[in-house]
Amino acid sequence: MASSKGKGWRILLLILLVIIVELLFSWPKILNSLGNYLIFEEEPQRGDVIVVLGCWEDTVVRAWHAADLYREGLAPVVFLPGVAKVKRWKEAEGEGISMPDQRSMLKEALRAFGVPKEAIRTVDEEVGCTEDEAEVTRRWLKGKNVRRVLLVTSRYHSRRAWILFRDALQGMAEVVSLPGPYDDFQADGWWRRREDAKRVVLEYEKLLYYKLRR
């Protein structure tokens, strides 16, 4: 009986060892899959408007790609959904200090990349997150003959942004996700780079929070 029990434990330990080894070898693949899932890119196609989402660190790369799409004739208008400002900007401006905002920076970058001023649309609404931008875009589209929106953002942000805009514009317009190729996000091996690790963790945190609220 004791010999039988000892044999059973050895078999169990062997199985556990195999599982551990398998996990060690497959763990990088799992992590890479998590990084790649955040990137949602569809085939470029003609639309009615290019919507560019704001981001302090990726202003240039997002404007660059939006300008590419505009110059290729994929849409006649570029829309910037609202104004995002630095924290405590009201206090600073109250002291007479002029503070920059994302929209102004995006406008300047778009113009620098060849998008004419008359093709850029925006609204004077303050936004603080992607969900705000989706809601502002929904309101702006009301009454307009817009059937397809080309959504431009960074690659690591593209999955969540597309989900938020798809939900916000449901029944109004199709949302096509066209993240730009110019940002420095690398989905494979993201956990080895501090900035990419921060991006991935925050995106999943925000995506989970949004899903739990639905």
Image (cartoon, rainbow, N blue to C red):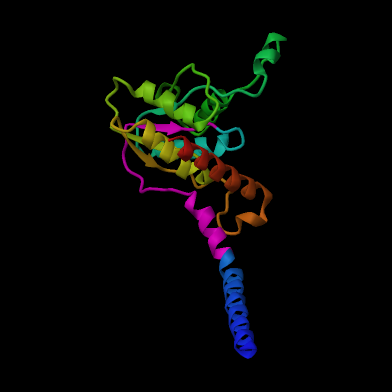
Residue 175, picture quadrant: top left
Residue 192, picture quadrant: bottom right
Q: Position of residue 33 (x, y in %)?
A: 51, 58
Q: Position of residue 1 (x, y in %)?
A: 61, 89
Magenta-span inclusion, residue 49 = yes
- Horizontal relation, residue 16 to residue 140: left or right: right
**Residue 121, placed above or below residue 167:** above
- Horizontal relation, residue 153 to residue 1: left or right: left
Range drawn in magenta: 28-54
- Horizontal relation, residue 36 to residue 1: left or right: left
Front residue (pair 88, 214): 214
Front residue (pair 21, 47): 21
Magenta-span inclusion, residue 43 = yes
Instruction: Specify the farthest residue to the front.
Output: 1
Residue for point 41% across, 26% down: 137
Q: Position of residue 150 (x, y in %)?
A: 38, 37
Front residue (pair 53, 120): 53
Residue for point 35% across, 48% down: 43
Q: Position of residue 115 (x, y in %)?
A: 45, 30
- Horizontal relation, residue 135 to residue 144: left or right: right
Picture mark count: 0
Residue for point 57% across, 53% down: 186
- Quarter of the rendering occupied by the C terminus: top left
**Residue 122, placed above or below residue 204:** above
